[in-house]
Amino acid sequence: MTDKNRYWPPVMIVVMIIWATFYPIIKYVVVDLDPLVLSFYRYFLGFIPLTPFFIAELRKQQTKPAPSEIVSISLLGLIGITLFSIGLFYGIKLSTAINGALLTNTQPIFTAILGSILIAEALSKKKILGVAVGITGMILVVTNGNFKTFDLGGTAVLGNLLLMGASLVLSLYSILIKKYAIKYGSIIPTWISMISGTFFIFIINILRGQSPTQLLALPGLSILLVLYLGIIGTSLTYLIFNKALIHMPVTTATSYKLLIPVFGLFFAVIFLGEQAGLTTLIGIFIVVSSVYIIQKETKHPEPSKSQ
């Protein structure tokens, strides 16, 4: 590891800590603000600082995205931004920040399954083991081990299912947008999908009669937290993580996400007073272990300088 690269591990840990704060912050803010209005502001404040980087990257491209590709990437925004947001923000509102930090970071489990179906990626025995272990852990977390009283109408169970759904659609988005990221680098398709997904969220809010001006009625602390989610937690961390992919293997960078449920649990307990029962803790351990197994098995190519 060069002197320059040795600074990236602690930087990545900081990024994971920031992402882990999302879950208690969302849980705190959605008490006073509609979940999809909060989601709108997160991405609206997120894509604006990314715009200069998008323009600079677009100018460097010899081949620009065709109109049909822009439409396709925009529709992916409906999946990876809009549907993901519905699952994430409403899921946390109905469930807990602890479960949000865990269940929305089970993407490698769903990606392993969807990858074998959609793009014919090999599903090795070790991956199958990781998927099976992960599903077992997710069931424990979703039901809290209470299989006899499993009730889809229960808000906690419904919230957990929404969080799993968020992870599922984000995995689907990641697989489908991969070809555009390879062709144009990651900033261009991410910016297009983010702005389109934000637009879809805005339209849904208007149709529901939810005005973005709700933000102005929030206490000062909540407004600051919303700004933090968008500018620091979305725009800045994305740029840092994207830069880190140039200096370390993708597998190594992705493995740091195993820290998110751990830090998320810590912040939820400290700032919200949430408690995780023994069943939930066991489920968290099982899911994190399964994600480790899957990521350890997956061989990712080194990223190109365009990422």
Image: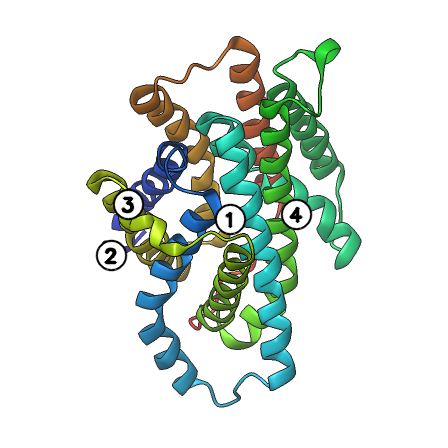
Q: Nearer the viewer, residue 1 or 208?
A: 208
Q: Which mark is residue 217?
A: 3
Q: How much space separates mark 1 and mark 3, taking CA atoms? A: 43 Å
Q: Is residue 267 visible?
A: yes
Q: Looking at the picture, does residue 224 appear above or below residue 81?
A: above
Q: Nearer the viewer, residue 147 or 90?
A: 90
Residue 21 screen position, x and y as percent: 34, 36
Residue 82 screen position, x and y as percent: 56, 55
* In this rendering, the label closer to the viewer, 2 or 1: 1
The amino acid type found where label 4 is placed reads Thr
* In this rendering, the label closer to the viewer, 1 or 3: 3
* In this rendering, the label closer to the viewer, 3 or 4: 3
Q: Which mark is residue 251?
A: 1
Label located before the other in sequence (3 or 4): 4
Q: Is residue 246 left or right of residue 80?
A: left
Label located before the other in sequence (2 or 4): 2
Q: Residue at x 33, y 38 (%)?
A: 17
Label located before the other in sequence (3 or 2): 2
The amino acid type found where label 2 is placed reads Lys
Q: Is residue 233 visible?
A: no
Q: Quadrant of residue 65?
A: bottom right
Q: How much space separates mark 3 and mark 4, taking CA atoms? A: 40 Å
Q: Which residue is mark 4?
A: 111
